[in-house]
Image (cartoon, helix red, strand yellow):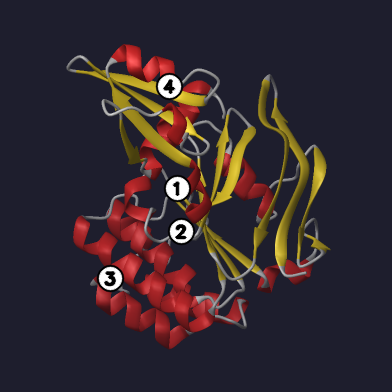
């Protein structure tokens, strides 16, 4: 089956349990969002999936093959991360080197994308700004036609115009090649309209995995007076509250109970960022 399967994966660094028995599947051919607060375990998980570090226990397979010490994964998956693993060469020379190392690298595409971003390919890496260092890594990732690609905080240091260009190019590439994309980011509002499925981890544990469509259908807010809202929320799965100007807002997972509503209560949808904040504030659904 074409997918990434994470089964009972745990990883500890000295006294810190970075991942705690995490299991989920990433379906092929979709854009997935991997969300978590700083220190939640996202980068550790990504590094294990991309075979940069090993799990203490559990297993990760891609298309039913283990990733551990498997040379076939070289052409299966690529991870663009915050860390820079490239030597301090000119950008153009790194493109040439990558072209030799990966059969699936599109050298002409890399030059074209660099031009769109205004990336000077004759500069050495250490002479690039933070933003253009991120752009360089994005160009590599977008030009490698691997079936699976991971973007770990992809727009670090990018201005608004460059972020919009990246999202545009990502969608174009996804629609043309149909590969699996995983975006790990804290800029949830920016990717909310891109991702089809979401995985939320917190403190090394899996909080939830769901399609965006299902998640938005099952999450909603109830607002009104404190007394009315608290009465409605009895026996409901409430993930958090806000109080604004004498009004109380409850964030609820589940389906709207029409028989518990009155004319003073207001129901509305919940956006992905607010849902994420409330889930990670309270540690789960």
- Residue found at the very far left of the displayed protein: 245
Residue 13: x %, y % from top left: 68, 28
Residue 61: x %, y % from top left: 78, 58
Q: Is residue 243 above or below residue 222?
A: above
Q: Nearer the viewer, mark 1 or mark 3?
A: 1
Along the horizontal axis of the image, is 235 left or right of 11? left
Q: Is residue 198 or residue 244 the one in the foreground? A: 244
- Which disc, if any, is residue 195? 2
Which quarter of the image is occupied by the N terminus?
bottom right
Q: Is residue 168 or residue 83 the one in the foreground? A: 168
Q: Earlier in the sequence, mark 4 or mark 1?
A: 1
Residue 65: x %, y % from top left: 82, 64
Q: Nearer the viewer, mark 3 or mark 4?
A: 4
- Kindly identify the residue that appears in the image at 67 percent across and 53 percent down: 49
Res. 166 image quadrant: bottom left
Q: Which residue is mark 1?
A: 216
Q: Earlier in the sequence, mark 2 or mark 1?
A: 2
Q: Nearer the viewer, mark 2 or mark 4?
A: 4
Residue 133: x %, y % from top left: 35, 58
Which quarter of the image is occupied by the C terminus?
top right
Q: Which residue is mark 3?
A: 119
Q: What element does badge 2 sit on?
A: loop
Q: Which residue is mark 4?
A: 232
Task: Tell whether label 2 touches label 3 (CB within 8 Å).
Answer: no
- Kindly identify the residue that appears in the image at 52 percent across and 51 percent down: 214
Q: CA distance from mark 3 to mark 2?
A: 27 Å
Task: Tell whether label 4 touches label 3 (CB within 8 Å).
Answer: no
Q: Nearer the viewer, mark 2 or mark 1?
A: 1
Mark 2 Cα-neighbour bin, 10 Å: few <14, some 14–19, many ≥20:
some
């Amino acid at each position: 089956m074409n997918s990434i399967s994470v089964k009972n994966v745990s990883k500890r660094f000295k006294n810190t349990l970075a991942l705690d028995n995490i299991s989920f599947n990433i379906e092929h051919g979709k854009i997935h969002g991997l969300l978590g607060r700083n220190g939640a375990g996202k980068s550790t998980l990504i590094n294990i999936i991309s075979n940069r570090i090993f799990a203490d226990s559990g297993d990760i397979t891609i298309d039913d093959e283990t990733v551990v010490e498997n040379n076939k994964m070289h052409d299966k998956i690529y991870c663009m991360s915050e860390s820079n693993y490239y030597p301090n060469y000119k950008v153009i020379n790194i493109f040439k080197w990558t072209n030799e190392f990966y059969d699936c690298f599109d050298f002409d595409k890399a030059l074209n994308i660099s031009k769109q971003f205004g990336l000077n390919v004759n500069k050495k890496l250490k002479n690039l700004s933070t933003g253009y260092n991120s752009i360089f890594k994005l160009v590599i990732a977008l030009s490698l036609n691997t079936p699976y690609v991971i973007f770990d905080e992809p727009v670090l240091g990018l201005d608004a115009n460059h972020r919009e260009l990246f999202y545009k190019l990502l969608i174009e590439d996804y629609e043309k090649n149909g590969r699996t994309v995983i975006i790990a980011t804290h800029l949830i509002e920016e990717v909310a309209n891109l991702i089809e499925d979401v995985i939320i981890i917190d403190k090394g544990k899996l909080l939830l995995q769901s399609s965006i469509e299902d998640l938005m259908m099952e999450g909603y807010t109830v607002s009104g007076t404190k007394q009315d809202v608290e009465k409605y929320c009895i026996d409901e799965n409430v993930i958090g509250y806000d109080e604004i100007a004498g009004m109380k807002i409850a964030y609820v997972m589940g389906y709207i109970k029409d028989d518990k509503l009155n004319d003073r209560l207001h129901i509305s949808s919940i956006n992905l960022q607010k849902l994420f904040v409330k889930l990670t504030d309270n540690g789960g659904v």
